[in-house]
């Protein structure tokens, strides 16, 4: 509950401070058309037009904290680790014209992003690291989202202790932000299992829980109402905001 209040209070402050920007955005018909009427208001106000701040090598935290559910320990994930992820495929399916099943080698060949950014967890800790990987927009462009596509759902290998799978979602506009990436490496080393190997989402413009670890499937959809709890993510199903812009 305290965490939720923390997020909401931040939203209220933005609401007051950004009224002018909000009006400008509301006057912009194009943005209205892209976002549609179903988007929450704070999405219009904060937006993801801005870029997250980048840092210097000397700012990198030597110990990047591990957080969230336990690293998956089921046979499917353990076999992948033992095979050094040779059998891993990132599936991109759903409302796409060209379904994908990308190996780690194929993803590495698409790697163009590397930036030092700060990860901010809603629990009140941050860590600076150098993240490298493939812009999510590159992978989605390969799959060619269909005309009705609006969201990308990230399905993860891990589960909460009570059994619900971890998942997350972004709208396709946030997905195309140049700093929204499928990370393959942290601080110039391949991701270790605890940080989400072999592929995790990394989105420095939003709070940490959006950066889904252990992603095995990206499902493109027109609505996430029918997926798991219907709120667009494991934490969203448990009361957190869907839009977690910083
Ligand atoms: N699959 C999965 N992704 C996840 C989580 C999780 O429990 N499972 N925790 C989230 C939270 S709350 C944070 S702060 C970051 C932590 O990432 P790190 O362990 O690399 O620091 O992962 C996010 N992504
Ligand atoms: Mo977090």
Image (cartoon, rainbow, N blue to C red):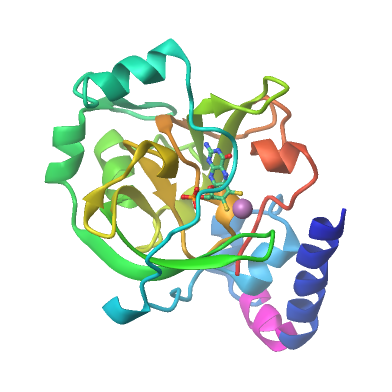
Q: Is residue 170 left or right of residue 139?
A: right
Residue 183 % position (x, y) = 33, 49
Which residue is more in the foreground, 185 or 96? 185
Q: Is residue 132 left or right of residue 176?
A: left
Q: Is residue 88 visible?
A: no
At 46% from the left and 40% from the top, the residue drawn is 213
Q: Is residue 60 above or below residue 198?
A: below
* Extreme residue in the top direction: 75
Number of marks drawn: 0
Q: Is residue 16 magenta?
A: no
At 42% from the left and 45% from the top, the residue drawn is 195
Which residue is more in the foreground, 125 or 34? 125
Residue 36 % position (x, y) = 64, 54
Residue 227 % position (x, y) = 64, 26
Q: Is residue 217 left or right of residue 135?
A: right
Q: Is residue 22 magenta?
A: yes
Which quadrant holds the C terminus?
bottom right
Q: Is residue 27 left or right of residue 143?
A: right
Q: Is residue 117 above or below residue 148?
A: below
Q: Is residue 204 visible?
A: yes
At 52% from the left and 42% from the top, the residue drawn is 150
Q: What's the magenta region?
A: 18-26
């Amino acid at each position: 509950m305290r965490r939720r209040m923390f997020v909401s209070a931040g939203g209220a402050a933005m609401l007051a401070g950004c009224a002018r920007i909000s009006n400008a955005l509301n006057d912009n018909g194009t943005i209205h058309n892209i976002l549609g009427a179903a988007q929450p208001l704070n999405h219009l106000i904060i937006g993801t037009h801005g870029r997250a701040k980048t840092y210097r090598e000397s700012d990198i935290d030597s110990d990047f904290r591990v957080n969230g559910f336990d690293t998956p320990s089921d046979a499917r994930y353990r076999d992948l680790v033992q095979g050094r992820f040779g059998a891993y495929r990132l599936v991109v399916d759903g409302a796409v014209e060209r379904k994908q099943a990308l190996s780690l080698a194929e993803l590495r060949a698409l790697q163009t992003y590397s930036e030092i950014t700060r990860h901010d967890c809603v629990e009140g800790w941050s860590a600076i690291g150098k993240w490298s990987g493939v812009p999510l927009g590159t992978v989605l462009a390969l799959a060619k989202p269909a005309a009705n596509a609006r969201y990308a759902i990230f399905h993860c290998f891990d589960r909460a202790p009570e059994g619900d799978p971890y998942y997350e979602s972004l709208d396709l506009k946030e997905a195309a932000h140049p700093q929204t990436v499928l990370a393959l490496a942290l601080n110039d080393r391949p991701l270790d299992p605890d940080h989400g190997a072999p592929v995790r989402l990394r989105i420095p413009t939003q709070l940490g829980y959006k950066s889904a670890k252990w992603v095995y499937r990206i499902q493109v959809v027109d609505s996430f109402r029918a997926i798991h709890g219907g709120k667009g993510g494991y934490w969203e199903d448990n009361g957190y905001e869907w839009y977690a812009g910083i």
